[in-house]
Amino acid sequence: MKQIEIDEIYRNTPLELIPWNIETPPAALVALVDSRIVTPCRAIDLGCGAGNYAVWLASRGFDVTGVDSAQTAIKRAKEHATKKGVKYTLRCHDTSCAL
């Protein structure tokens, strides 16, 4: 999908209808953090979308930067962070370019 199409999805579709917008972090991540195998540190969430995992990590003390190519996703991630009372850094950047 092109960046413009992704932004349009975030602009016109309720979050609960976006198939990849999963609020609960993966069980493996939860287990690593809950067991303290992974402790709060700097973290990056590439393709953060609405910021669900970034919010979860930030609420557990991680210094998170969320990155997404869709400006509307970043806007929704900011709203989500405010609603949940957490702070983290957000950047709109196209990460699909060749390195």
Image: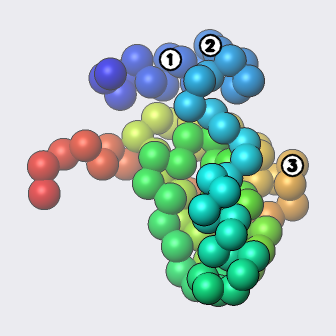
| Quadrant housing residue 30 | bottom right
Residue 86 place in picture, x, y as percent: 80, 64
Rendered-image quadrant of the N terminus: top left
Mark closer to the chain start, 1 or 3: 1
As shown in the figure, which amino acid type bears the numbered disc 3? Lys
Sort mark 2 into few (<14), some (14-19) or many (20+) by Cα contacts within 10 Å: few
Above or below — where is 7 with respect to 30?
above
As shown in the figure, which amino acid type bears the numbered disc 1? Glu
Say left or right for 83 vs 76: right
Q: Which residue is mark 1?
A: 8
Circles 1 and 3: CB distance less than 8 Å? Answer: no
Say left or right for 1 vs 38: left
The Cα–Cα distance between marks 3 and 2, rounded to whole angstroms, is 20 Å
Above or below — where is 27 with respect to 38?
above
Above or below — where is 83 with respect to 40?
above
| Depth order, front residue of 83/1 | 1
Circles 1 and 2: CB distance less than 8 Å? Answer: yes
Q: Which residue is mark 2?
A: 12
Mark closer to the chain start, 3 or 2: 2
Q: Residue at x 62, y 13 (%)?
A: 12
Residue 88 can be seen, yes or no? no
